[in-house]
């Protein structure tokens, strides 16, 4: 499906929002998930560090915006959805509202769903830059715009997808 005029207008607006927001905050997803020495500790460490407090904040935000975190009993350590809630980009979005983010790994489906709901709830555009020149824009109307080096795609609120031919 090609992009409609409304999609193009949406993308121009999203790009404008992205440039207005300025330089993205670098988010280390690997460090948060795998590096034991990181201040953002793994949920299994048993320590009640700042990482855990932030994860709790993310879980509370999820409740507020109606997002059900992906559950995985082997890593959730007794708290359903805790592992997905600890993903660095979610923590960064909740603790730095309004800042564009740059992640070092592509976002997972749970993070994309979380950001979609967060953008609607906060009535603001969230911008996340992914490796390989990809950028995702989560819009307050619930639509998601994905910009890749090969073109642009719009995931509309009704679930349909538009793509710019190249
Ligand atoms: Zn994630």
Image (tube, grey):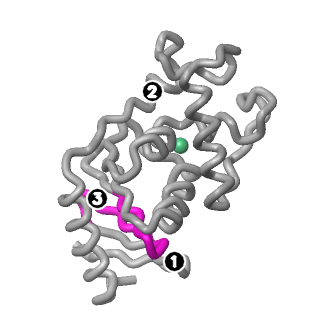
Q: Position of residue 60 (x, y in %)?
A: 65, 46
Q: Residue at x 47, y 16 (%)?
A: 38
Label 2: state its secondary structure.
helix
- The residue to which callout 2 is attached is 30
The tag earlier along the polypeptide, 1 or 2, is: 2
Q: Residue at x 59, y 51 (%)?
A: 110
Q: Horizontally, is 8 left or right of 77 in the view?
A: left
- The residue to which callout 3 is attached is 148
Q: Quadrant of residue 49?
A: top right
Q: Horizontally, is 152 left or right of 159 in the view?
A: left
Q: Residue at x 22, y 72 (%)?
A: 166
Q: CA distance from mark 3 to mark 1?
A: 20 Å
Residue 55 or 31: which is nearer the viewer?
55
Q: Horizontally, is 106 left or right of 147 in the view?
A: right
How many neighbours does mark 2 have within 10 angstroms: few (below 14), some (14-19), or many (20 or more)?
Answer: some
Q: Quadrant of residue 74?
A: top right
Is residue 150 part of the magenta span, yes or no? yes
User: Which callout, 2 or 3, points to the residue nearer the camera?
Assistant: 2
Q: Say whether mark 1 is within 8 Å of ligand 1.
A: no
Q: Are marks 1 and 2 in contact (CB under 8 Å)?
A: no
Q: Which residues are magenta?
A: 136-151
Q: Which mark is residue 157?
A: 1
Q: How many marks?
A: 3
Q: Are marks 3 and 1 in contact (CB under 8 Å)?
A: no
């Amino acid at each position: 499906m090609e992009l409609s005029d409304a999609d193009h207008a949406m993308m121009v607006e999203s790009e404008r929002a992205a440039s207005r927001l300025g330089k993205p905050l670098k988010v280390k997803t690997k460090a948060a998930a795998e590096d034991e020495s990181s201040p953002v500790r793994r949920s299994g460490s048993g320590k009640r560090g700042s990482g855990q407090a932030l994860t709790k904040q993310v879980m509370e935000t999820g409740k507020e915006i109606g997002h059900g975190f992906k559950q995985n009993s082997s890593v959730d350590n007794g708290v359903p959805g805790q592992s997905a809630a600890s993903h660095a980009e979610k923590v960064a979005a909740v603790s730095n509202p309004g800042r564009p983010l740059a992640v070092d790994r592509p976002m997972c489906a749970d993070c994309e769903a979380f950001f979609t709901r967060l953008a609607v709830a906060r009535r603001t555009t969230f911008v996340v830059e992914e490796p390989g020149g990809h950028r995702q824009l989560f819009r307050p109307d619930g639509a998601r715009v994905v910009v890749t080096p090969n073109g642009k795609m719009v995931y509309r609120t009704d679930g349909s997808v538009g793509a710019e031919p190249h």
